[in-house]
Amino acid sequence: MLSPNIERALNEQMKLEAESSQFYLAMAGWAENKGYNGTADFMYRHSDEERTHMLKLMKYINERGGKAIVPALPKPATDFKELREVFDTLLSHEEMVTQKINDLVFICLDERDYTTHNFVQWYVSEQIEEEALARTIIDKLNLIGTDKSGMYLFDRDIISINATSAAAPDAAK
Ligand code: OFO
């Protein structure tokens, strides 16, 4: 059985994952409208992944005798100046999510809920991968600068970038 405090914290995290999914869906729409089809594809996949993160929490809360609450979501940003701004926004969002996961770990230990602590470890590892992925992409954009043909190649190649390649940076370049 979950304590009310843990149940509330897990529901907050569930909302955050749903927000992340919406956030990346909006980025996918922006990229598609600008003709960055590779980036759009990447963002659509990323949005789907975030939804699975949300579902994983929803099922866990309900399985442990809590009540998962499907949340209302704020409208995400839909306009960006350039690709670089999209990925900078993505990285700072993921850094904030990592902080929230760390807070969740703290609450689990504080309440001695080792089962939930164990469950949350999956999210701890996932955040390492997601931040590494965002940084790998931003490094590439830094190398390209404002070069248009470089941007074309970036958009073509991002389809093959995934969290595994980010974990082995040399393989991703
Ligand atoms: Fe769910 O990993 Fe990003 O936010």
Image (tube, grey):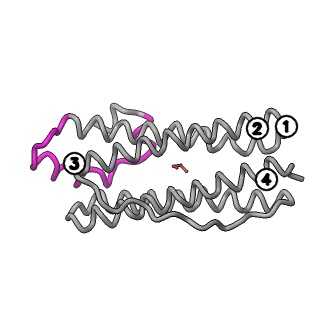
Query: Badge 4: few (under 14), some or many (20 or more) residues near its Cα, within 10 Å?
Result: some
- Per the image, the residue denoted by label 3 is 154
Q: Say whether disc 2 or disc 3 marks the residue closer to the N-terminus.
A: 2
Q: What element carries label 4?
A: helix
Query: Which residue shows up at 29% across the image and 51% down it?
Result: 158
Q: How far apart are marks 2 and 4 (CA)?
A: 11 Å
Q: In which image quadrant can residue 43 be found?
A: bottom left
**Most distant residue in the right direction:** 1
Q: Residue 107 carries which label?
A: 2
Q: Which mark is residue 7?
A: 4
Query: Which residue shows up at 71% across the image and 65% down it?
Result: 69
- Per the image, the residue denoted by label 1 is 111
**Amino acid type, residue under disc 2 in the picture:** Ile
Circle 1/circle 2 CB separation < 8 Å: yes
Q: Say whether disc 1 or disc 3 marks the residue closer to the N-terminus.
A: 1
Q: Nearer the viewer, residue 165 or 108?
A: 108
**Amino acid type, residue under disc 4 in the picture:** Glu
Whether the residue carrying mark 1 lies under 8 Å from ligand 1 is answered with no
**Amino acid type, residue under disc 1 in the picture:** Glu
Circle 3/circle 4 CB separation < 8 Å: no
Q: Which of 143 and 70 is in front in this view?
A: 70
Q: What element carries label 2?
A: helix
Task: Give the residues drawn in magenta, as a range.
Answer: 143-167
